[in-house]
Amino acid sequence: MSENEQILDLNYAVYLRIQEVMSILDIKSISKLAEMSGVNKSTISTLKTKKDKTVTLQTIRLICKAVGMTLAEFFDSPLFPNDKEKLLIEG
């Protein structure tokens, strides 16, 4: 897998995690999350379509702050394997 493909996959994993958090917290739309976080709706939506090449930590931090979640809690998901799991998968 190329570096660009890995970045796009990471963006999509971030999008899926955002969707998961929205579902848990009963946030009905990306528009509502955008309003809560101050992140443009298009920025969040672009992650789904895999058109954007990068997602910034600042964007994730703003979303986390809006929903009362730490970055550690956000990334504590099977969507983001830790280094040991990644080594087992790739190794």
Image (cartoon, rainbow, N blue to C red):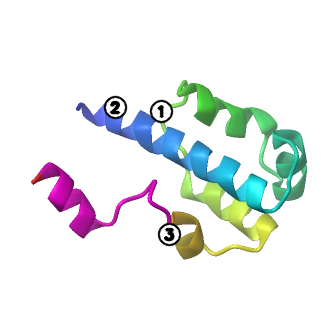
Classify residue 82 as left or right of residue 23.
left
Pointer 1 residue = 53
81 in the magenta segment = yes
Pointer 2 residue = 4
Q: How many marks?
A: 3
Give, as a three-letter code, the residue at label 1. Lys
Give, as a three-letter code, the residue at label 2. Asn
What residue is at 17 percent from the left and 60 percent from the top?
A: 87
What residue is at 70 percent from the left and 65 percent from the top?
A: 64
71 in the magenta segment = no
Which quadrant is the N terminus positioned in?
top left
Q: Which of marks 2 and 3 is in front?
A: 3
Pointer 3 residue = 76
- Callout 1: SS: loop
Front residue (pair 56, 77): 77
Give, as a three-letter code, the residue at label 3. Asp
Q: Earlier in the sequence, mark 1 or mark 2?
A: 2
